[in-house]
Amino acid sequence: MNLSISRKMLYKVIAGILLIAVTFIVYSIRQSGEDVIWIDEGEARTNYQNPQEEIIAEDEPMVASFIVIDVSGEVMVPSVYTLSDGARVYEAVDAAGGLTENADTRNTNLAAILSDGMKLYIPSKKEVEEEEKQTGETPGSRYINGSTSQSAAASGGSKAGLININTANSAELQKLPGVGPVTADKIISYRNEYGEFKAIEELMNVSGIGEKTFAKLKNTITAE
């Protein structure tokens, strides 16, 4: 009988201790100001996966677009530069270290938009003066690409009615005897790859232009 009473008392004591412990824990948490949130294991797994997918989607890199420009003439560091698509002439000049003291930009459109593969040439004051004496025109800035040519010196026309093979665009080159759209594009591609022609005879280095074709057009071209 006494043993039974002792066991009952023991159970009551243990239950009382547990109740006190739980009460103390709950009270401590409330005092700290922290909220207790019970999360189901399945829910936690789902909530973990979804944000991860969103993060991956947000971190996808943006594809940037660039153009490559050949800058030469009266700039501090003539070279080939990579610029952002839509860059303007003044940005190419800045990339090349700026203008030299001898640069002449009176007829240069510094706000013009550049395109990929373009050659930008900034003339010197001496070049402008000599050009003015010879033709009465000012060269300005020179662009050479597949189909664009700007300013007086950059146009295909030249003194004495000759076509300048270093600056003429596709339409102007097609005015030459025996030169069609395909050959004109080959001339421009060769010029962009190897630079300006030093002499008109170098035109025979272009695929499709042999001695016979050159003989027909040699008196109509110049390589200034």
Image (cartoon, rainbow, N blue to C red):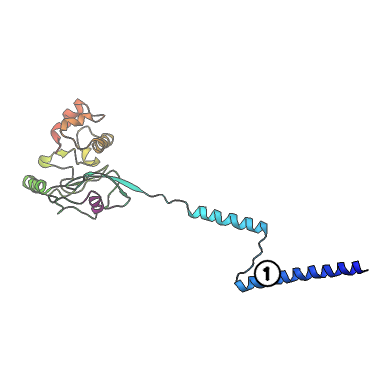
Please report the bounds of the magenta region as a residue range. 87-97
Q: Is residue 53 left or right of residue 77?
A: right
Image quarter (top left, top right, bottom left or bottom right) of the N terminus? bottom right
Amino acid type of the residue that numbered disc 1 sits on in the rendered structure: Ile
Q: Nearer the viewer, residue 169 or 12?
A: 12
Image coords of residue 139 (percent x, y): 14, 48
Residue 38 sits inside the magenta stretch? no
Q: Nearer the viewer, residue 33 or 85?
A: 33
In the rendered structure, the answer to whether residue 224 lies left or right of residue 25 reads left
Q: Is residue 33 above or below residue 179?
A: below
Query: x, y (%) of residue 184?
Result: 25, 36
Residue closest to the eye, 28 or 40: 28
Percent of width and height locating residue 129: 8, 48
Q: Quadrant of residue 194?
A: top left
Looking at the image, which residue sits at the far top? 211
The residue shown at (58%, 56%) is 50
Query: On the image, which quarter does residue 206 sit in?
Result: top left
The residue where tag 1 is placed is 25
Can you say whether 124 is above or below 221 in the image? Answer: below
Q: Residue at x 16, y 34 (%)?
A: 198
Q: Position of residue 69 (x, y in %)?
A: 27, 45
Residue sitting nearer the eye, 11 or 180: 11
In the figure, is residue 1 to the left or right of 200?
Answer: right
Secondary structure mostly seen in magenta is helix
Mark 1: secondary structure: helix
Q: Residue at x 15, y 46 (%)?
A: 153
Decide: few, some or many residues near mark 1? Use Cα within 10 Å; few <14, some 14-19, many ≥20: few
Residue shown at 62% from the left, 74% from the top: 31
Residue 88: in magenta span: yes
